[in-house]
Image: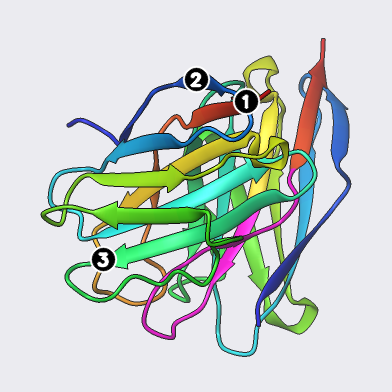
Amino acid sequence: GAGVSQSPSNKVTEKGKDVELRCDPISGHTALYWYRQSLGQGLEFLIYFQGNSAPDKSGLPSDRFSAERTGGSVSTLTIQRTQQEDSAVYLCASSPGGTGGGDTQYFGPGTRLTVL
Amino acid sequence: AQSVTQLGSHVSVSEGALVLLRCNYSSSVPPYLFWYVQYPNQGLQLLLKYTSAATLVKGINGFEAEFKKSETSFHLTKPSAHMSDAAEYFCAVSGNSGYSTLTFGKGTMLLVSP
């Protein structure tokens, strides 16, 4: 079946502009995660959605970052007033959810964001 | 809090040689452990995971890993490297506190020479 998809695959923006990154999880997966991958910081957790529960936003680096998940499916990560340090690959993952630890996460190909 | 340490940012082997990628974890609860592989310009692909069913875990592409609680380790091995194994490998841990956010190591780039 179809895996996790993300769009766009690449995004170049100017400092100070807002960007939106999209994630389409695997159909039926109730859990959705955003991670950021950068040279200096490695892979970092950003935010987690599980079903209709309030999202875990503990990994968001600043209030310029926000995310929503509509209808329990598609998710959008928004970065306002982008800064050069936001340049990274943003990875989305989904998992069946509801089983606690050990749930396998399936990753999308990522969106490479470059802030000039 | 959980953490993962991967020893060696780069590991070089010859084709046909043993692959050993090291991972040590820190967790206050019995962990779930994962190895993911990332090929250039691609997302992460699960190689294998440990969920306490067996300490020796076999994964895809001939890889396996052994969970050693006494050493807090989960090293990844493959008896014979292939050129197609060249990629970056990430070890990750999640807890059992109700959700499964992953904490990743810094990654190890595996280089395979002919």
Question: Considering only order in the chain, which callout, 2 or 1, is on the residue closer to the N terminus?
Answer: 2
Q: Residue at x 47, y 32 (%)?
A: A110
Which range is magenta?
B91-107
Q: Residue at x 77, y 41 (%)?
A: B108
Q: Inspect this view and state whether residue A22 appears.
A: yes
What chain is tagged by disc 1?
A
Labels 1 and 2 within one chain:
yes
The relative height of residue B56 versus residue B63 in the rendered view (above or below) is below
Dot label at residue A114? 1
Instruction: Evaluate if marks 1 and 2 touch, with contact meaning CB atoms under 8 Å apart.
Output: yes
Horizontal and vertical percent for residue A68?
A: 29, 55
* Tag 3 residue: A97
Horizontal and vertical percent for residue A111?
A: 48, 29
Q: Nearer the viewer, residue A61 or A81?
A: A81
Dot label at residue A10? 2
Q: Secondary structure at mark 3?
A: loop
